[in-house]
Image: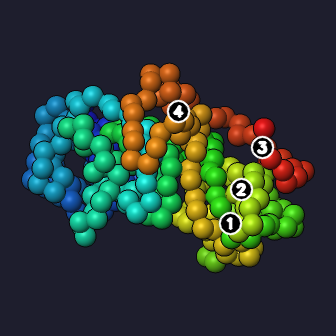
C-alpha cells in the first residue's frame, strides 16, 4: 500500500518525520530512480527507495536506548567533520538517531532509536513531554531572576519562552545548582535564559524526559528501555501540568 515517503523513512529509522522531510528537500531521496518531493508516495513492498544511494529497509525491529551523553559529544547520528557522536557510543548493528538533542557542552539523558513515530511524540511540544535538568549557574540567584524564568523570557529572536519550573537545589561559594523543568525545547534555551537574566550557565545535565529518568547511568553508559518505559513515552500527555507560579527557592524533596 502506498504511503508518504517521509513516513516510510521515519519508520525505517532515518529520523523523525520532520528530519525525513529535510532529507527529501535536500534531494537525497529517490524512488525507482526519481528524486521525490514532499508529499510523494511509495509502496515500500514494491518500490525501490534510496537515501544517498543506499536502499531503505522498512522491516527492521524498533530499538530504544537510554544514553548518558557526555560533554564534548555531538547529539547527531553522523558528523561530516568526523567528531564523535552519540551513535558512536552505541554499537547495535542498526541505524539509530538521537531524540531530545543536547548541545555539545551539555550532558545527560538522551534517547537513541529507529522509531520515527516515537521521536515525533517526544519532540513535538503538543504532546507535553517535560524535560528536567540540573544546571549550575555562576552566581547565587535572586528571587526576581528565578521569577523571570517562571514568567517566561523573550529570547534574542523575539520568541517568548513558556513558563519554566525552577528551584534552587543547592548553593555553593561559586554559584548554585538549579532544578529546571521545561515544557518545550528550543535550541540553547537554558543558556540564553541564563545569559539574559544575569545567571551564566556553566553546566547542564538532563535528568529526565517525560517519565524516563537518567537513573544510575554514568557518562557514556547506555541501556535498552523496557517495554513499559516505551509505552509510557508513547502515551501523550493530554494536559501538561500548569506552571506553579508561587514556587519559592529551596531544596527539592
Label 1 element class: strand
Quarter of the C terminus within the rendering: top right
Q: Earlier in the sequence, mark 2 or mark 1?
A: 1
Q: Nearer the viewer, mark 4 or mark 1?
A: 1
Label 4 element class: helix
Query: Which mark identifies residue 252?
Result: 3
Query: Which mark identifies residue 111?
Result: none
Whole-angstrom CA distance, mark 1 to mark 3, is 17 Å
- Residue behind mark 2: 178
Q: Earlier in the sequence, mark 2 or mark 3?
A: 2
Whole-angstrom CA distance, mark 2 to mark 1, is 8 Å
- Residue behind mark 4: 233
Image position, residue 35 (x, y; %): 18, 58
State left or right for residue 112 relative to residue 238.
left
Query: Which mark identifies residue 137?
Result: 1
Mark 1 touches mark 3? (CB < 8 Å):
no
Which residue is more in the foreground, 11 or 175? 175
Colour convention: rainbow
Amino acid at each position: 500500500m502506498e504511503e508518504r515517503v517521509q513516513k516510510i523513512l521515519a519508520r525505517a529509522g532515518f529520523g523523525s518525520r520532520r528530519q525525513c522531510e529535510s532529507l527529501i528537500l535536500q534531494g537525497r531521496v529517490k524512488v525507482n530512480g526519481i528524486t521525490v518531493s514532499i508529499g510523494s508516495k511509495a509502496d515500500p513492498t514494491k518500490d525501490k527507495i534510496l537515501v544517498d544511494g543506499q536502499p531503505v529497509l522498512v522491516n527492521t525491529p524498533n530499538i530504544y536506548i537510554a544514553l548518558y551523553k557526555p560533554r564534548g559529544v555531538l547529539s547527531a547520528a553522523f558528523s561530516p567533520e568526523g567528531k564523535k557522536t552519540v551513535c558512536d557510543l552505541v554499537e547495535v548493528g542498526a541505524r539509530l538517531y538521537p531524540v531530545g538533542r543536547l548541545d555539545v557542552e551539555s550532558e545527560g539523558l538522551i534517547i537513541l532509536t529507529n522509531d520515527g513515530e516515537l521521536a515525533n511524540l517526544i519532540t513535538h511540544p503538543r504532546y507535553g513531554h517535560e524535560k528536567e535538568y540540573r544546571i549550575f549557574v555562576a552566581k547565587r540567584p535572586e528571587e526576581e531572576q528565578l521569577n523571570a524564568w517562571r514568567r517566561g523570557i523573550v529570547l534574542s529572536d523575539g520568541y517568548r519562552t513558556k513558563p519554566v519550573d525552577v528551584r534552587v537545589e543547592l548553593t555553593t561559594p561559586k554559584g548554585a545548582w538549579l532544578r529546571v523543568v521545561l515544557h518545550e525545547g528550543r535550541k540553547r534555551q537554558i543558556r540564553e535564559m541564563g545569559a539574559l537574566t544575569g545567571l551564566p550557565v556553566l553546566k547542564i545535565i538532563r535528568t529526565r524526559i517525560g517519565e524516563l529518568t537518567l537513573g544510575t547511568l554514568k557518562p557514556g553508559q547506555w541501556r535498552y528501555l523496557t517495554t513499559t518505559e516505551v509505552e509510557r513515552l508513547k502515551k501523550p500527555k493530554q494536559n501538561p501540568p500548569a506552571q506553579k507560579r508561587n514556587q519559592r527557592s529551596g531544596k527539592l524533596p
